[in-house]
Image (tube, grey):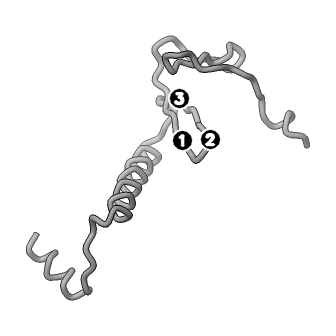
Amino acid sequence: MTLSEIMEIALTKMSSKGQIVIPSEFRGDMKEGEQLIIIKNNHQLILKKASEMDKNLKEDLTFAKRTEAAWERYERGEFKASTAKDFLKDLERW
């Protein structure tokens, strides 16, 4: 099976305002004003209709964003190291 047999490919370009056109053959049942989700994964952009996104995926994306933000804070040195015992003491104070 070749790549062209399992996926459709088309070219589009981005305007100076950051807008892109979805080729008509890919729009299918999409309507004007429909919300789309764009997921950036390294050098890939994944486009999905928001109406087809299930609740679990929404929760997963929210968790992934929070995890990514926490990792960035960690890399900037915004976290402090502590022992398990000290960590549990801090939790009790919350």
Are discs 2 and 1 less than 8 Å apart at CB? yes
Q: Residue at x 65, y 20 (%)?
A: 13
Q: Quadrant of residue 47?
A: top right
On screen, residue 48 versus residue 13, left or right, reads: left
User: Which numbered disc covers residue 44?
Assistant: 2
Tell me the CA gap for discs 2 and 1: 6 Å
Q: Is residue 91 above or below residue 43?
A: below
Q: Secondary structure at mark 3?
A: strand
Quarter of the image where the N terminus is located? top right
Q: Amino acid under label 2?
A: Gln
Q: Amino acid under label 3?
A: Lys
Location of residue 20 in the rendering, given as x and y in whole percent from the top left corner:
58, 19
Q: Is residue 14 above or below residue 57?
A: above
Q: Residue at x 25, y 74 (%)?
A: 80
How packed is label 3: few (under 14 Cα within 10 Å), some, or many (20 or more)?
A: few
First in sequence, mark 3 or 1: give its number.
Answer: 1
User: Which numbered disc covers residue 40?
Assistant: 1
Location of residue 66 in the rendering, given as x and y in whole percent from the top left corner:
35, 53
Q: Amino acid under label 1?
A: Lys
Location of residue 18 in the rendering, given as x and y in whole percent from the top left corner:
51, 21
Tell me the CA gap for discs 3 and 1: 15 Å
First in sequence, mark 2 or 3: give its number.
Answer: 2
Q: Nearer the viewer, mark 3 or mark 1?
A: 1
Q: Residue at x 34, y 61 (%)?
A: 76
Tell me the CA gap for discs 2 and 3: 17 Å
Residue under circle 3? Answer: 49
